[in-house]
Amino acid sequence: MTLPTAYPDPALISPPAGTLPPAYGAVSVSGVLPPAYGDAAALNLNFTSNNALDSRITFSRASNATYFDSTGTLQTAGSGVARANAFQDHNPSTLAPLGFLIEEQRTNSIRNNTMQGAVAGTPGTLPTNWVYFVVAGGLTRTIVGTGVESGIEYMDVRISGTTTGANGVTFCPDFGAAATGQSWTASMYWRIVAGSTTGVTSWALGVIENTSGGVFVTGAFYPQTAPTSAGLATQRAVATRTLSGGATVAQAVHVPQINIPNSTAVDFTLRIGLPQLEQGAFATSVIKTTTAAAVRLADSASMTGTNFSSWYRQSEGTFVTRSDTLSLAASRGVFAAGDATLAFGAAETIYLAYESSLSGRLVASNLDGGVQQFFLGPVVAQAVNTPATFAVAYKLNDSAATVSGNTPVTDGTCTVPTPTSISIGSLASGWSGAANNLNGHIQRLTYYRTRLPNTTLQALTA
């Protein structure tokens, strides 16, 4: 049954005094609101439900993007489709829902990570644009075939024989144009589908620096957990390097390595899926390619105009969020409510972010008239890929913030801003640009039109 137009939104109907309706339980509520604060949240964005994205949110991303569905299968969200709610990301190992995935722009420099052009045989034909696949003396390489597992395109390669050298196996899907000082991240899915890896001493993923002519300058191999027979989607090797080879460096090269000692007999089949090489200090969701490098543009989510003013209260209020992030290498915005300039650092702003300079602590801050009024950072360091529930309450000379049920930190000498819009997953209010993207997931964003008591803030985040 649907309510007639004259009736209010069910989300704004007051529940019995002293309780939150069941729909709000996912905010990690370990207690209930006292009777004086019994009204339901004025805004309750639950991105882990299977409903449609809230129609008040303006979302854009002018490219495809990938996510794992509830079965652990890699799917593609089309241009302009938010990876939230019915299209939300999931943990491919546990199948747990992760919520709204919001990422910055990235490019996969590997031109063909979907194995186009590979031909079975001994040694077989490598995928188009792959650079090399070298095995030590005494070993035989056989391309068994290609296919798709859990939405991941793969190539199976059998390595067999007895080594007459100590180099093992090294291969290169591709490289990207790069410069010294940049951070690059290589990644790939892999698993063992036949045979035994007995005799293999280590597995590594290298990020190598070359000149424009492909001449080695420097680089390193980063140890990886040995692949097993577990599902391909659950095993992603990742390595990050800040290039340091100097002015001659012009390429970053993706180079996996399998170390096998001399005079060692081996016979195993390795499944290789969707290798990626991207400029950045951490791996993001995989970008599929066939013939050329491909770009995934930034996710953009905001609420403006009456879609914001209908629920926001300038004089006092409380935000409660639950989120995670892929990296603490830079400040990562969970939300920013700001004025009409629609930019981070606007004269009227209240925001929440993971602050890299403070060991990844979640920090709430605001500016009123361009002057910072409070900077509330509970002394609790966060970890990547680990959800945390945070609350920030504001009111004239009475603001507070807490995370994970800790004692709130407070500020008793602050004024409050007058924002007119909110960005979700960025510190650029209204999303004027890709500034300090979350690069992670938001499970929930809830707002109450009152400055909740400190004990309630703790209960809501415990």
Image (tube, rainbow, N blue to C red):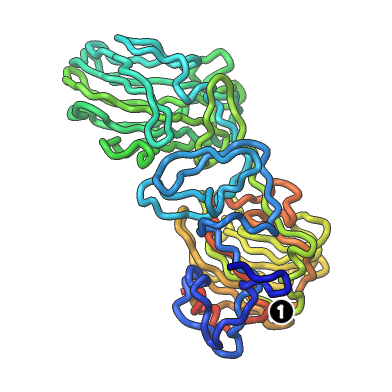
The x and y percentages for residue 55 are 67, 57
Left or right of 33 on screen, residue 311: right
The x and y percentages for residue 179 are 61, 28
Quadrant containing the N terminus is bottom right
In this rendering, the answer to whether 21 lies above or below 307 is: below
Q: Nearer the viewer, residue 328 or 426?
A: 426
Amino acid type of disc 1? Answer: Glu
Which image quadrant is residue 395 in? Answer: bottom right
Left or right of 84 on screen, residue 224: left
Q: Secondary structure at mark 1?
A: strand
Mark 1 = which residue? 316
Q: Is residue 436 visible?
A: yes
In this rendering, the answer to whether 234 lies above or below 451 is: above
* Residue appearing at x 73%, y 57% in the figure: 429
Which image quadrant is residue 143 in? Answer: top left
* Residue appearing at x 52%, y 83% in the figure: 19
Q: Residue furthest bottom?
A: 35
In this rendering, the answer to whether 228 lies above or below 360 is: above
Q: Residues within 10 Å of mark 1 (few under 14, many from 20)?
A: some
Q: Nearer the viewer, residue 92 or 435?
A: 92
* Residue appearing at x 39%, y 46% in the figure: 71
Q: Is residue 359 visible?
A: no
Left or right of 48 on screen, residue 392: right
The x and y percentages for residue 183 are 55, 36
The x and y percentages for residue 3 are 64, 70
* Residue appearing at x 61%, y 24% in the figure: 247
Counting labels gives 1
Q: Nearer the viewer, residue 168 or 17?
A: 17
